[in-house]
Amino acid sequence: MKIRPWSLAALERFSKEGGTEILRFQPWESVPGLCQGVTVRPSREEPELTYRRLSAGMQGEGFGVIRRLKQVHGARVMIAGKDTPGSIPTGDGLVSSEIGVLGLVTIADCVPVFIFDPVSACWGLLHAGRRGVAAAVIKEGLRVIKETLKVDLKRVEIYLGPSICPCCYEVGPEVARLLAKVSQGGVVTRNGGRRYADLRHLLAFQATSCGVPHENIFTSAYCTSCHNELFYSFRAESQHALGRMWAFMGRRE
């Protein structure tokens, strides 16, 4: 399957807003009201503090509603609306057609999947690690967008944000077999029989199988492990030291 090259740094831009440094996908910056990006790691700041600062800034920028999830590495995708849930819902994806709603997910090696329809301005934001890829969270997100929000998937654009690259993501035989069921070519064997997985390749394959044109899928130039000075990485650090980045998406009022 043809997938866009990794060298997309020209389509990504770092900026600083309200004390938070952010990596953005430049082609969407011209869309009126659309706000999206991934926070760059601060200096050992607790994720909740980053969340509170980011949320406070966004509320002053036309977002009256902030939606987040209790992530479980699954395939549950929810509609993000202006209704007020009693607690933080469990899931790994948000989609919305409403203005003034901002969705957030946390990442650190897992893939932040940004989905956007330039015609209806509907959006989706997913958290996809190896278990989410195996559970086909991107297929579920696209299904919800198509069936619930009535979006033609041939118009959809997808940006697979900064996450661990296949050179850094070694997996065991059981995980390799599980991911190989998703797509051929997403798991490779090299270096004396060691297996490495390309989560973004697997996600792109799943998206095209749903009808998203391959030319509409873009992959970040950044690996969270190779660029550990910019992003948190479980593989490059450890669970004890691990922080989180926040991926966010929404349309301002």
Image (cartoon, grey):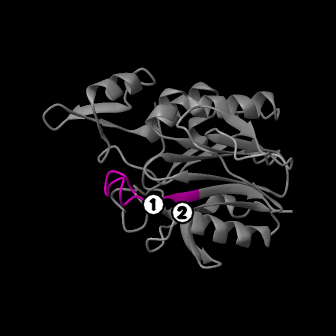
Q: Amino acid at mark 1?
A: Gly
Tell me what residue is drawn at x 44 percent, y 74 percent: 43
Residue 91: x and y, percent?
64, 38
> Tag on residue 28?
none
**Pointer 1: what residue?**
243
Q: Bounds of the magenta span?
A: 233-246
Task: Identify the residue under disc 2.
Answer: 47
Left or right: residue 29 compared with residue 186: right
- The front one of 28 and 144 is 144
Q: Which of the two discs, 2 and 1, labels the residue nearer the N terminus?
A: 2
Residue positioned 49% across, 71% down in the render: 45
Residue at the image position 40 percent from the left and 27 percent from the top? 179
Residue drawn at x 80%, y 49% as measured from the top left: 121
Q: Residue 165, relative to residue 181: is it above or below? A: below
Among the 4 quarters of the image, the one containing residue 237: bottom left
> In which quarter of the view is residue 252 placed?
bottom right
Main SS of residues in magenta: loop
Image check: 180 left or right of 172? right
